[in-house]
Image (cartoon, coloured by chain):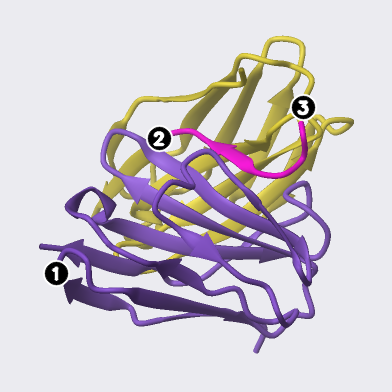
Amino acid sequence: EAQVTQNPRYLITVTGKKLTVTCSQNMNHEYMSWYRQDPGLGLRQIYYSMNVEVTDKGDVPEGYKVSRKEKRNFPLILESPSPNQTSLYFCASSQGNPTDTQYFGPGTRLTVL
Amino acid sequence: KQEVTQIPAALSVPEGENLVLNCSFTDSAIYNLQWFRQDPGKGLTSLLLIQSSQREQTSGRLNASLDKSSGRSTLYIAASQPGDSATYLCAVPNQAGTALIFGKGTTLSVSS
């Protein structure tokens, strides 16, 4: 089954404790991206990757890191999480770029205390 | 800067009703427009992608229209069912082609 998977689905952590949210797709997609969704603000892009080893900042990259060492994986790293990073996070992928049909993961709900 | 707006923010209808969800965008120079469905606790599912050269796109009971010149798209849902209850989002690519710009969504509730 073609899908984007994220882990963990739910995470409660404390300020400053490094964490990684994994994202994996099995569709051989070139493009991958991370969004966060907040009430009243909607979905905003954090980082994106056009291909392996090619990543770039989106609209809200502060406090986040990513890597794209393999085509299928695109982890989101929070080196020192803060409460303002409490949010619902989505990973997405598509064959080329966002003009192609986007496939989204199920989301990761992160709470930073 | 492109902005996408969806009105209304919430909509409640009885089962069987036909309904229209609205999406507007400020910059008409779009490549395409996508409609998504979001269920609580689940990710976004792409419903329809309508290219800028198209006027309509249909999938089952769903029909999306696009009027680039007026900066509007509509999602028509025929014979609504309780299973259609979800949040519907529209999105367009940004000018650089690196991200989707989303509306804040319309939350639809269909009662039986």
Question: Do pointers 3 and 2 mark residues of a single chain?
Answer: yes
The structure residue drawn at horizontal position 29% and vertical position 49%, both measured from the top left corner, is: B110
- CA distance separating discs 1 and 3: 41 Å
In the image, residue B100 lies in the stretch drawn in magenta? yes
Q: Which chain is in purple here? A: A
Q: Nearer the viewer, residue A16 or A93?
A: A16
Which residue was labeled with disc 3?
Answer: B30
The structure residue drawn at horizontal position 10% and vertical position 62%, both measured from the top left corner, is: A113
- CA distance separating discs 3 and 2: 18 Å
The chain ID associated with circle 2 is B
Which residue was labeled with disc 1?
Answer: A14
> What kind of residue is marked 3?
Ile
- Tell me which numbered mark, 3 or 2, is placed earlier along the sequence: 3
A4 relative to B15 in the view: left or right: right
Q: Nearer the viewer, residue B20 or A79?
A: A79
In the depicted structure, whether residue B70 falls above or below residue A53: above
In the depicted structure, whether residue B25 falls above or below residue B100: above
A26 relative to B43 in the view: left or right: right
Which residue was labeled with disc 2?
Answer: B104
Q: Which residues are magenta?
A: B96-104
Is any part of residue A102 visible from this angle?
yes
- Label 1 secondary element: loop
